Image (tube, helix red, strand yellow):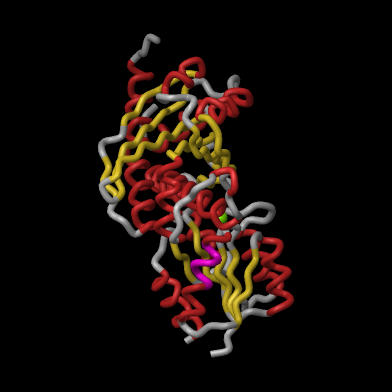
């Protein structure tokens, strides 16, 4: 992919958003579970649709995926992939019992999972909104527990023609010395990217 | 005490968390709703003294539910609780009649402070 100057500043801009957003999201996670969360610098890159599956290691790993619609002044989709071990750990911390069977989640567990995504996405998007002065809201998360590849194929089917580039943010962090990874795929409409950049004074 | 409190959140976990905090502090008349439509129905039926209102919910969201409740009862006391803590959202909520805005995640003490401030 050849990138001109204009494209370059667009990439820098989106990477910066990813950086600040992930910091906020993980800080919120730490507050939610009332544990120390140490994070490494996030890895950020742009992928296109045919690179999606290769971008996360182990498409056959079963993970928790959350699909969140972003709308308002900015339109797009966020897809969170969280390791099931993290989800289980959070259940242990907040509900006092580790998850044994992910296929047998009750309402309380499902709502806890969704609330993690809601809070992380909410703080991510709020950071973006505060930086730009735009009004951006998120939908209720849709939860799917499946192989990473299967979860990724959902936006692939529906939005291939809508979103050219996808921002992939990979976070590594530790909770009580245990290491976890999460991936956020941020699908943004080109028009929305232009609007965000304009708010930052980049054209 | 004897004050009625309505907790509105689509996440059962969040309702449980707030409810536990309130019952541990002596509140017994607690009602729950899982979306904005149920919130209005429950408000009309129970006339609670205070409402905690989530924003991101299916069917009718919390901002719309706030407006509906205030239209039904302009004296309604509603406090928003949301992860969408951006300024534009807070401003819209306050302009629509919310008394306060608690950003998720929060410590239960923040909820209890609000209860004593509003219900005094
Ligand atoms: Mg909610």
> Vertical placement of A5 versus A103: above or below?
above
Q: Where is residue A132 in the image (x, y as percent from the top left)?
A: 41, 42
Locate residue A21 relative to residue A70 in the image: left or right: left
> Vertical placement of B113 versus B40: above or below?
below
Q: Nearer the viewer, residue A10 or A96?
A: A96
- Count the numbered circles shown: 0
Please, which residue is most extreme toward the front here?
A: A100
On the question of residue B76 being in view, the answer is yes
Q: In which quarter of the image is ligand 1?
A: bottom right
Locate residue A27 relative to residue A117 in the image: left or right: left
Magenta span of residues = B14-19
Q: Which of A86 and B120 is in front in this view?
A: A86
Q: Where is residue A171 in the image (x, y as percent from the top left)?
A: 34, 36
Please, which residue is most extreme toward the top here?
A: A2
Q: Where is residue A129 in the image (x, y as percent from the top left)?
A: 43, 45
**Quarter occupied by residue B61:** bottom right
Q: Residue at x 33, y 51 (%)?
A: A27
Q: Residue at x 70, y 68 (%)?
A: B40
Q: Residue at x 34, y 28 (%)?
A: A44
On the question of residue A17 being in view, the answer is no
């Amino acid at each position: 992919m050849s990138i001109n100057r204009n494209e370059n500043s667009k990439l820098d801009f989106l990477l910066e958003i990813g950086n600040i957003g992930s910091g906020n999201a993980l800080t919120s996670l730490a507050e939610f579970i009332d544990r120390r969360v140490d994070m490494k610098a996030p890895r950020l890159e742009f992928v296109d649709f045919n690179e999606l599956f290769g971008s996360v290691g182990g498409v056959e790993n079963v993970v928790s995926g959350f699909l969140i619609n972003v709308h308002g002044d900015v339109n797009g989709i966020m897809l969170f992939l969280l390791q099931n071990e993290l989800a289980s750990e959070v259940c242990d911390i907040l509900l006092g019992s580790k998850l044994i069977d992910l296929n047998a989640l009750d309402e309380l567990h499902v709502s806890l999972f969704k609330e993690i995504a809601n809070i992380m996405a909410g703080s991510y998007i709020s950071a973006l909104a505060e930086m730009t002065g735009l009004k951006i809201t998120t939908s209720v998360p849709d939860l799917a527990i499946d192989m990473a590849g299967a979860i990724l194929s959902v936006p692939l089917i529906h939005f291939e023609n809508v979103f050219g580039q996808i921002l992939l943010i990979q976070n590594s962090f530790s909770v009580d010395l245990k290491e976890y990874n999460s991936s956020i795929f941020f699908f943004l409409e080109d028009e929305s990217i232009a609007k965000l950049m304009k708010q930052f004074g980049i054209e | 005490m004897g004050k009625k409190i309505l907790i509105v959140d689509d996440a059962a976990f969040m309702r449980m968390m707030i409810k536990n905090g309130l019952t541990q502090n002596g509140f017994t008349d607690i009602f729950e709703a899982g979306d904005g439509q149920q919130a209005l129905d429950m408000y009309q039926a129970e006339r609670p003294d205070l409402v905690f209102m989530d924003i991101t919910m299916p069917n009718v969201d919390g901002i719309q539910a706030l407006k509906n409740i205030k239209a039904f009862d302009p004296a309604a006391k509603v406090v928003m609780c949301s992860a969408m803590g951006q300024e534009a959202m807070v401003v819209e909520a306050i302009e629509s009649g919310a008394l306060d805005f608690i950003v998720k995640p929060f410590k239960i003490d923040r909820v209890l402070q609000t209860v004593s401030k509003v219900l005094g």
